[in-house]
Image (tube, coloured by chain):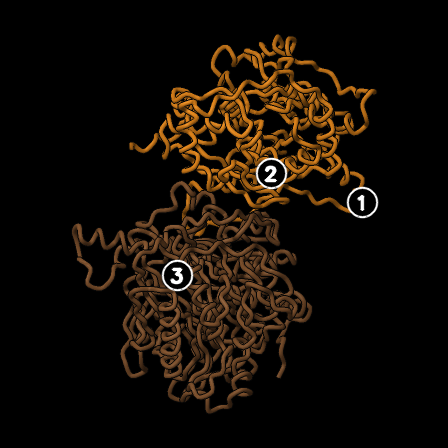
Amino acid sequence: MHYKRPKADVVIVGLGWSGSTMAEELTRAGLNVVAIERGAWRETSTSFPTTRNPDELSGSIRKEILQAPVTETYTVRNKPEETALPLRKYHNLTLGNNVGGAGTHWAGASWRWQPFDHQPYSHVMKRYGPKQLVDGLILQDWGVTYDDLEPFYDRFEKIAGTSGTAGVINGVKQPGGNPFEGSRQSPYPTPALARTRANILFADAATRLGYTPFPVPSAMIGAPYTNALGINLAPCTYCGYCQLYGCGNWSKSSPNICILPVLMQRSNFTVVTESEVVRINTSSDKKTATGVTFVDSDGNTGEQPADIVIVATFTLDNTRLLLLSGISTPYDVSSGQGVVGRAFTFQTLSWAFMFFENEYLNPFMNTGALATQIDDFNGDNFDHTGLGFIGGAGIQSLCNQGLPIGMSGLVPEGSPKWGKGWKQAFQKSYQNYAQIQGQGTSFAHREQFMDLDPTYKDRFGQPLLRITYNYNENDRRSGQFIRDKCVEIAKEMGARDVTGVSLADQPYSGYTPWDSSHVQGGVVMGEDPKTSVQNRYQQNWDIPNLFVIGASSFPNNAGYNPTVAVGATTLWTAKAIKELYLKNPGPLVRL
Amino acid sequence: MARNLLQRALRISFRSGIVFSVTALPVCTVRAEDAPTSARIEHGRYLAVAGDCLACHTATGGQPFAGGLDLKTPFGIITTSNITSDKETGIGNWTFQQFENAVRHGKGPNGHLYPAMPYTAYSQISDPDIADLWEYIRTLPPVNHKVESNKLPFPYNIRSLLVFWNLLFFNDSAFVADASKSEEINRGAYLVNGLEHCGTCHTPKNVFGGDTKKTFQGASLQGWYAPDLTNNAHTGLGHWTEDDIVTYLRSGTNRYTAASGPMTEAIVNSTQHLTDADLRAIAAYFKSLPPRTVSPPQPLPASNEQVKAGQQEFVVECSACHRSNGKGISNMIPDLQNNPAINALNSDSLLNIVLKGTEGPATHANPTGAAMPSFGWKLQDAQIANVLTYVRNSWGNAAPAISAADVSKARTALNAQPAVPR
């Protein structure tokens, strides 16, 4: 069956953080908004009740909150000359499967990106010149600066109730915060979380080494808070069931907690759930988007016409939807021309894993983003002259895991594998294991890209998205540099055994343990239509009523998690739609 | 408006392509030349909201005002009628006089209405207000939906018997202002005793379902205890200021508590939409009432075995949200200290909330809607009895112990889940 829904002012594809943030702005402006979400409805109190939610088997092991690869997946290869294969098992890209998207089950690290991260090209050229870049590296500015985005970072933090300690307010450094952060107009809405024993050991060691530790800003809120939309949040109880879990305690900011209750009060908002958008429809001249086509879970095909189309799905699916719809020019690796799928980035992780001899670290008390960090080696906060790379990492003592099944494999090398000996080793290592993560930058490269797979198709018969990715030389150099810093701090903390790893030393795989879930780019914003799909307002260069929002707009990845930057750029685009586009529909940037 | 009803229906059936949006009270479109009438219709709509007509006259998941909701009374089930303008199944053929007779005097065209329709309160509605209410009700779009209202067993199915009931328990008189009280308090009294019909739930009933003289002293119905609204500091609103009452009726929450059970619907459907002046008048009226004269009992000692065992349960099951000291989170998670609902002699609501959980109030002023999860499946009767006994006798609270047998009885009566065997 094929049906057509009544025309809306705006259709939003995907109702995660970016979609719901956009929906709140546009419905408040009086527009009639229809959101189409492939996942099912989820509500904080009834879907994730505190009585039932802390269940490691269903959450972390069976991954019940994620979209299963059998439903939809990606194919991966390391080099353009290889044949890509599908990711058939649960992989590191943890996709949401419900209203709220991955914003429901995220770990909650809540970073503003630094001024450098929004203008990496200008910064590098000014400080080092072109010879600092390894061969094939793609580096470009976003067209929007940190100063442009600051009010929107501020607003998003006040929707999320972000906890943290400010480092720079109105240009003045603040004690206890990150001295390298971009200047803020106000402190974090809620106070920083308490530190664990491992965080304290890290902070002390980092201070002795001359670095500046500070609490990682977190979605686990530090005190009761009424957010910018009038919704109440309760303080985090450190139960530790955050990543891969919804929070039924109203303590982890998510679309379900922070935005959806307000949207559901508005008569000009509708969400169609369990329906997957398969195509953006365009006029025959390809200059106007006319709406979207979706398939509901009964297999019926629906059409949602709209005056404005906003695509807010998972990063990779934003790219795929443009490719499936024949919108803008796909990237061609052989010529280096084309834009959709280009400037794809991942994250460069380094680790120091350590065991103490006789500590009591009590990892069971933790939250998803409970960490103490130094930014002395992040972004361009240190002199890269002679190092042969750009970027770096946030180096953090991360206490995001203490669940018994997940921790059971973490025993020192040479421990018995079973029986009483293993139990004794596990009991000891549970209280003595700690980790330092270097969450590194990732810069695009001409041989890292996405396109449609020529072989594998999804359940609707449409090609899967193909990822061609391997770490580039810049990643390998920065990863090793950061790994050594992690090891240096781990040793200073007094750990007995320390193992340092740079994941970029191995070829990329979607299954690597300890790896990141962050991917960016493919539909990037920028200043030049030859190297970007969208202008500085995340508006398509060719189709002015199409906006693709999310981390797909970022041409590089920072040494941070992307969510708050996604929120800020979404609010920036919402303002442009409300104040510029609606008054004069058409391109907001004319060349 | 009917968001909570809608969501409940939707939670039950997660099927494909489900569309979630808010349904609103029908708003008629009126031409500009009818402006005076349009103002009266709008006023009538406000009165219908104040009277919360929608809540009873709409079936779960049904069309607004088309009736069909089963009201469970001690005498059997009464199904609410279709009051849309449908000529066949609604009240499209009614005259104003018939409407007035039904709403204010409990007399329908086919005989007496059952007092599940709160005409005992609506008799207080003024002449101009009943006229405006009619102007609005007659604009409701017709919905053809036949409802069989009377499914009561013998002898309650004999409508004419209500003549005697009315003689005994229905004071069919209009509202009379108390000249010794302020205009605001009188406005509050008019709303509370008339359209808002608070006494329907909060005033104890006699065996015939008629109001007793214990006005607003708290009453049990449909598995819930509608608490004491007098100014008794232990079980009533003694500690609440007028602002606390206004905030509660506007948002469903205040610094002390959050609404639960049927009161959530009353707030979501009705009181949150009242003007600030009307809410202030209601608050002023309640604060003008004398306190109920009962003194609090002595709390059980901390050495009591149930209190001791209950404290352990509280730490494990309750303290994450209500916090270790029971103080909760303002405007979100109820404060269990000095909480009149906790201190109530009658524990129906406490048992209902713990066994089945309760939806949180989601209002325009406070859209949060934080709910209490069900513990029925998780905790045994004795565990629930102990934790409630602990809470009822800690932090300044004092109330009788609750036994495992009380919990077991409530579990059966409420059709709550059995506890998972330990």
x, y (%) of residue A64? 34, 52
Please give the chain letter of the residue carrying mark 3. Answer: A
**Color of chain A here?**
brown
x, y (%) of residue B267? 61, 35
Residue at the spot 42% in from the left edge and 43% down from the top edge: A50
Kindly identify which residue carries mark 3: A95
Say what secondary structure mark 3 lies in: loop
- Which of the 4 image quarters holds residue B272? top right
Q: Amino acid at mark 1?
A: Glu
x, y (%) of residue A415? 20, 59
Say what secondary structure mark 1 lies in: helix
> Mark 1 or mark 3, which is nearer to you?
3
Please give the chain letter of the residue carrying mark 1. Answer: B
> Mark 2 or mark 3, which is nearer to you?
2
Whether the residues at callouts 2 and 3 have beta carbons within 8 Å, the answer is no
Nearer the observer, B159 or A168: A168
Say what secondary structure mark 2 lies in: loop
Kindly identify which residue carries mark 1: B33
Mark pair 2, 3: CA separation: 35 Å
Kindly identify which residue carries mark 2: B253
Q: Amino acid at mark 3?
A: Leu
Mark pair 1, 3: CA separation: 57 Å
Whether the residues at callouts 1 and 3 have beta carbons within 8 Å, the answer is no
| Mark 3 residue crowding within 10 angstroms, few (<14) / some (14–19) / many (20+) | many
